[in-house]
Amino acid sequence: MTIKIRFLLLSVLMLSLMGGFIPDSAATHISKPVLKEYKVEYDLGEKIVLVGWVEYDDQPTSDVLLNVKVLQPEGVELLERSIVSDERGYFRIELETENLSPGNYRIVVTSHCREVHRSICNYRNEALTIRLKQ
């Protein structure tokens, strides 16, 4: 074997072995919605208001797309809505209850990350069960 071929094979082998020591290049964007203040019991007709922020590296993060789903007591999706965190990283969700029935409704808020991170987003969520009473 010539020296060039040996060098090439040795280089490929070294690079392959070193690849195990290189940090994972397939990074993920880990943002998550955090509900700040909320109550879990409402009267029918009372507006549900949820406030929170999107956390990334322990800081509120702006311009993050959030998906909000409301599930009926039977688990059937009642509504789905998208919102974006504001310039300070906060969001506000308002839901009308006047046309609903009493029962427990599950609200799921999922972070879809910023547009530039969408391909590496891990879609973390926070869920909350709200009770509507008469």
Image (cartoon, grey):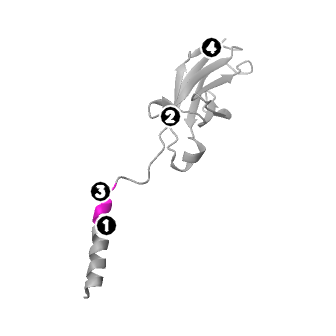
The crowd level at tag 3 (other Cα within 10 Å; few <14, some 14-19, many 20+) is few
- In the image, the segment drawn in magenta is 15-22
Q: CA distance from mark 4 to mark 1?
A: 59 Å
Residue indicated by mark 4: 42
Mark nearer the N terminus (4 vs 1): 1
Quadrant where the N terminus sits is bottom left
Q: CA distance from mark 3 to mark 4?
A: 54 Å
Mark nearer the N terminus (2 vs 3): 3
Mark nearer the N terminus (2 vs 1): 1
Mark nearer the N terminus (4 vs 2): 2
**79 vs 25, nearest the viewer:** 25
Residue 100, position in %: x, y? 71, 21
Asked which secondary structure carries label 4, the reply is strand
Q: Amino acid at mark 1?
A: Ser
State if disc 1 and disc 2 touch (CB < 8 Å). Answer: no
Residue indicated by mark 1: 16
Asked which secondary structure carries label 3, the reply is helix
Q: Quadrant of residue 46?
A: top right
In the depicted structure, whether residue 94 falls above or below residue 114: above
State if disc 3 and disc 2 touch (CB < 8 Å). Answer: no
The crowd level at tag 4 (other Cα within 10 Å; few <14, some 14-19, many 20+) is some
Mark nearer the N terminus (3 vs 4): 3
Q: Amino acid at mark 4?
A: Tyr
- The question of residue 17 being in magenta is answered with yes
**Residue furthest to the right:** 99
In the depicted structure, whether residue 12 falls above or below residue 20: below
State if disc 4 and disc 3 touch (CB < 8 Å). Answer: no
Residue indicated by mark 3: 21
Residue 102, position in %: x, y? 65, 18
Q: Quadrant of residue 43?
A: top right
